[in-house]
């Protein structure tokens, strides 16, 4: 059963297509049969009935026992064997919020309700049944009222009906959004755009004619303990003049870091001190993908350099665009803190457990020393295979140069470069070795 539920979440529930209302005419397929419903802000849950009783589970198979809504479910679904997908939410006359579900589970379970929106399997219904057949089954089994009910939906034949439905339920009544299901096609979710204030942690410069301008920004949030959580890489939405102006600001100072973040173009971000705040707009915030909960790097800042802490539960921003610099905002938990995304963080499955990662393998290492007037300088060259490239969060190969000279103001300097193959990594190694090891340097 657990495999069936997790597969549903991975293949169906997580693949809704998010779009904004003004993109309906451009990005949504036209269909003669569409079903509109209000998007409940809660947690995905499943009613699993074996003909005798029903249980409520999440996609990992965890059961919530003793919920009052199960009495109603047992009554309505008595004698039926079925698996129903729906949203576990706090029953309210106004808008529901997903972040209220965990506290309600422990302190007010009588306020929890289940809004059913799909049949995974059941009497006369299967995964190949049309949406209309599934909904007719839900209406017949559960009705549209009570703590366990089928969602309320409206059948329409044109995209022109979406805007009035959205205005009534989202604009006027404050619902989270609208779900549009095609009879046999894709499912869309339409939500208001979301604005977030994020701190700039790094940048990538443009290439060629775009050099001297920002290509992408590496953005994050401030955790309660002062650490920085990487959230997004954003490059869309900037004009050419904004890219030039941003580059002038962010390139004034650089920061050392033992963590390497790579852009979508496989270019390492240049890290900078956490001093600038920008506003970003997106159309959705996701706490997990079809592969599971989203994790991104958490970094510590000591005033001079970033140090890697661990992968941490994070989010992904859908269709994020740069809106502008927020000079009125400061880098603190109030202005750029986690409170902005807390309601999207799914706590139903417990704390994220950091996965066991394979150890890296050193492929070449050389250290050289140069002594002058009794003072030693050291240069260490290191290339390694991460053995973590399959995670999607690490490059395949990394080259590192550590340069220590006690005569300099900044005595210790470290640079990193990435490679896709061992040959590329060793070429980087040889190039830096030839450039940095001249007369006077001796192998350690």
Image: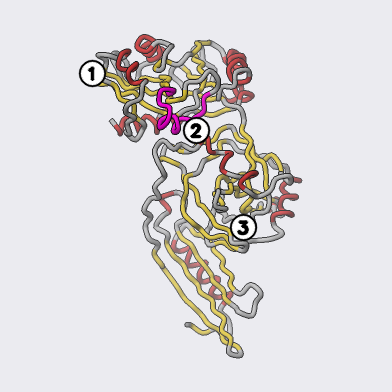
In the displayed structure, would residue 193 be above or below residue 207? above
Q: Can see residue 133?
A: no
In the rendered structure, find residue 311 and report the number of the disc placed on it: none
Q: Which residue is mark 3?
A: 270
**Alpha carbon separation for disc pair 1 and 2:** 32 Å
**Which span of residues is magenta-colored?**
96-112
Q: Which residue is mark 1?
A: 52
Q: Which residue is mark 2?
A: 99
Q: Secondary structure at mark 1?
A: loop
For the N terminus, which image quadrant? top left
Question: Which residue is at 39% across, 38% downward?
Answer: 349
Residue 106 on the magenta segment: yes
Q: Position of residue 46 (x, y in %)?
A: 36, 26
Magenta stretch prevailing secondary structure: helix
**Alpha carbon separation for disc pair 3 and 1:** 61 Å
Label 3: few (<14), some (14–19) or many (≥20) C-alpha neighbours in 10 Å = many
In the displayed structure, would residue 151 be above or below residue 364? above
Viewer-nearest residue: 354 or 348: 348
Q: Position of residue 348 (x, y in %)?
A: 41, 35
Give the image quarter of residue 167. top right
């Amino acid at each position: 059963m657990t495999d069936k539920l997790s597969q549903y979440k991975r293949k169906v529930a997580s693949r809704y297509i998010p779009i904004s209302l003004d993109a309906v005419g451009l990005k949504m397929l036209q269909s003669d049969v569409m079903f509109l419903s209000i998007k409940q802000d809660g947690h995905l849950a499943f009613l699993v009935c074996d003909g005798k009783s029903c249980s409520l589970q999440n996609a990992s198979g965890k059961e919530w026992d003793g919920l009052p809504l199960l009495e109603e479910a047992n009554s309505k679904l008595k004698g039926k064997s079925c698996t129903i997908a729906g949203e576990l939410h706090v029953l309210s006359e106004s808008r529901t919020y997903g972040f209220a579900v965990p506290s309600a589970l422990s302190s007010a379970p009588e306020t929890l309700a289940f809004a059913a929106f799909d049949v995974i399997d059941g009497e006369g219904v299967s995964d190949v049944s049309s949406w209309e057949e599934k909904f007719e089954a839900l209406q017949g089994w559960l009705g549209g009222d009570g703590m366990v009910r089928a969602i309320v939906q409206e059948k329409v034949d044109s995209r022109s009906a979406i805007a009035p439905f959205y205005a009534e339920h989202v604009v006027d009544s404050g619902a989270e959004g609208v779900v549009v299901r095609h009879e046999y096609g894709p499912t869309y979710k339409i939500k208001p755009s979301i604005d977030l204030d994020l701190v700039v942690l790094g940048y990538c410069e443009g290439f060629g004619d775009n050099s001297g301008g920002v290509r992408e920004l590496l953005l994050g949030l401030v955790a309660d303990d002062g650490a920085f959580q990487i959230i997004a890489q954003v490059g869309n939405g900037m004009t050419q003049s904004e890219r030039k102006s941003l580059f002038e600001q962010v390139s004034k100072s650089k920061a050392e870091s033992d963590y390497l973040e790579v852009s979508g173009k496989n270019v390492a971000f240049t890290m900078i001190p956490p001093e600038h705040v920008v506003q970003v707009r997106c159309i959705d915030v996701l706490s997990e993908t079809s592969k599971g909960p989203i994790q991104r790097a958490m970094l510590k800042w000591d005033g001079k350099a970033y140090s890697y802490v661990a992968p941490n539960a994070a989010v992904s921003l859908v269709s994020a665009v740069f809106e502008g610099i927020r000079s009125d905002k400061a880098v603190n938990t109030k202005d750029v803190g986690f409170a902005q995304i807390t309601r999207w963080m799914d706590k139903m499955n417990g704390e994220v457990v950091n996965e066991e990662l394979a150890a890296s393998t050193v492929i070449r290492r050389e250290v050289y020393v140069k002594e002058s007037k009794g003072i030693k300088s050291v240069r260490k060259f290191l290339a390694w295979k991460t053995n973590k490239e399959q995670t999607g969060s690490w490059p395949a190969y990394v080259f590192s140069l550590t340069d220590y000279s006690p005569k300099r103001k900044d005595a210790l300097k470290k640079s990193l470069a990435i490679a896709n193959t061992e040959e590329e990594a060793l070429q980087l190694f040889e190039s830096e070795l030839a450039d940095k090891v001249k007369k006077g340097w001796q192998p350690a």
